[in-house]
Image (cartoon, helix red, strand yellow):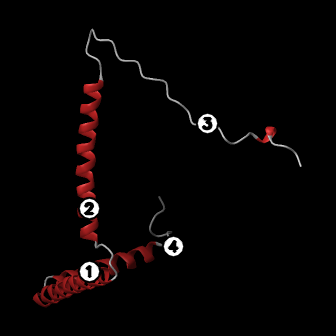
Amino acid sequence: MPDKENDPLAVWRDLLSQWEQNVNAIANRTMGSDEYSSSMNGAMTATLKLQETMRQFMATYLASANLPSRTEVLAIAERLGGVETRLDRMTALLERLAMPRSGEAAAPEPPRQRPPRTKKPPSAEPVA
């Protein structure tokens, strides 16, 4: 590690450290004042009012455009999740009922009939 006398950046680091300490002191004094607290409270209140106004505006716009709002989409997604859960339970129950009990022979499945093939492969088509 170089010594402070030969370090060309030592002065810069000292100035930066002093600047940081001064800024921190000013910021702490400012943030500790009642004026700062009331102004931040006012800013947060204005921000929340703006957000509520924008939410109402978007809900009105989406309703006029006949589009669902975010809350409506979330409600639909929740209902769809419930339907999928019930469907999974019913599928599991049906699979359990369809499984043969021990000692019973499973009924063979009839062979599946395939639809007739109407398209010919390229090698069977006449060449023009």
Mark 2 crowd level (few <14, some 14–19, many ≥20, 10 Å Cα) = few
- Name the disc covering residue 116, or none: 3
Task: Decide which of 14, 79 is in the foreground and name it.
Answer: 79
Mark 1 crowd level (few <14, some 14–19, many ≥20, 10 Å Cα) = some
Mark 3 crowd level (few <14, some 14–19, many ≥20, 10 Å Cα) = few
Q: Amino acid at mark 1?
A: Ala
Q: Which residue occupies 44% across, 72% down?
A: 10
Q: CA distance from mark 3 to mark 4?
A: 88 Å
The reply to whether the C-beta atoms of the residues labelled 3 and 2 are less than 8 Å apart is: no
Q: Give percent across and percent down for residue 64.
A: 30, 84
Badge 1 or badge 2: first in the primary sequence: 1
Badge 4 or badge 2: first in the primary sequence: 4
Q: CA distance from mark 3 to mark 2?
A: 42 Å
Q: Give percent across and percent down for residue 15.
A: 39, 79
Q: Circle 4 sits on which residue?
A: 8
SS at badge 1: helix
Q: Judge depth for marks 1 and 3 and give the one in front.
A: 3
- Name the disc covering residue 59, or none: 1
Q: Which residue occupies 38% across, 75% down?
A: 14
Q: Which residue occupies 56% across, 33% down?
A: 114
Q: Is residue 124 above or below residue 24?
A: above
Badge 1 or badge 4: first in the primary sequence: 4
Q: Is residue 39 above or below residue 75?
A: below
